[in-house]
Image (cartoon, helix red, strand yellow):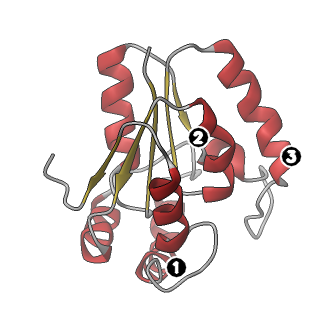
Amino acid sequence: MPRLLIFGNSGSGKSTLAQAKAEAWQCPHLDLDTVAWLEDVAPPTRRPIPASQALVTPFLAANDEWVIEGCYADLLDLVTPHATELIFLNPGVETCLVNSRARPWEPHKYESPEAQQANLEMLLEWIAQYPLRDDEFSLQAHRKLYDEFSGPKREYTSNSR
């Protein structure tokens, strides 16, 4: 009964790997982006953690098997006790930048391909700060989450698996 948690920097390949695993295992996939942000709010604003948790908890209760992915260490902390396995995607900033430039339109995040493209420069700057930040999206927070997990775990430092 797999309950896989995948995390890493934006552009690290989380969504691609999570979709492939969920399809192979025929289990539900939750992208934490869908519960982390308030809808139709400009500028983008995070939901309060309890409100995000209120969306994650029913997903966990309804599914014995799952793949969950995201970059939010504060939300990942809520899910980690339920996970049977972790995958930390840490291919380096340059790979994440290349992947982000090549990513297809994500309709669950952007209203149009043009809206996604308009956000790209801001996203690239944010990705580049990954090893320097000390927030819930940082390498530091992800490393701590990985190091503290006592179950099966893997860290990938390239997109070749």
Callout 2: helix, strand or loop? helix
Q: Residue 119: image x %, image y %?
A: 52, 71
Q: Residue 84: image x %, image y %?
A: 47, 29
Q: Residue 146: image x %, image y %?
A: 46, 55
Q: Which mark is residue 122?
A: 1
**Residue 121 higher or lower than 110, as above or below:** below
Query: In the displayed structure, does residue 59 sit left or right of residue 52?
Result: left
Task: Look at 38% across and 13% down and name the residue there.
Answer: 26
- Mark 2 or 1, nearer chain start: 2
Within 10 Å of disc 3 (Cα), the crowding (few <14, some 14-19, many 20+) is: few
Task: Look at 32% across and 75% down and name the residue there.
Answer: 93
Q: Of 81 and 20, which appears nearest the observer?
A: 81
Q: Which mark is residue 50?
A: 3
The CA distance from mark 3 to mark 1 is 27 Å
Query: Which residue position is annotated with label 2?
Result: 80
Within 10 Å of disc 2 (Cα), the crowding (few <14, some 14-19, many 20+) is: many
Callout 1: helix, strand or loop? helix
Task: Look at 70% across and 50% down and name the residue there.
Answer: 36
Disc 1 marks a residue whose amino acid type is: Met
The CA distance from mark 2 to mark 1 is 29 Å
Task: Count numbered badges in the picture.
Answer: 3
Residue furthest left in the image:
160
Q: Nearer the viewer, mark 2 or mark 1?
A: 2
Q: Residue 74: image x %, image y %?
A: 68, 56
Query: In the displayed structure, does residue 6 sit left or right of residue 44?
Result: left
Q: Of 2 and 113, which appears nearest the observer?
A: 2
- Mark 3 or 1, nearer chain start: 3
Task: Look at 39% across and 24% down and name the residue there.
Answer: 22
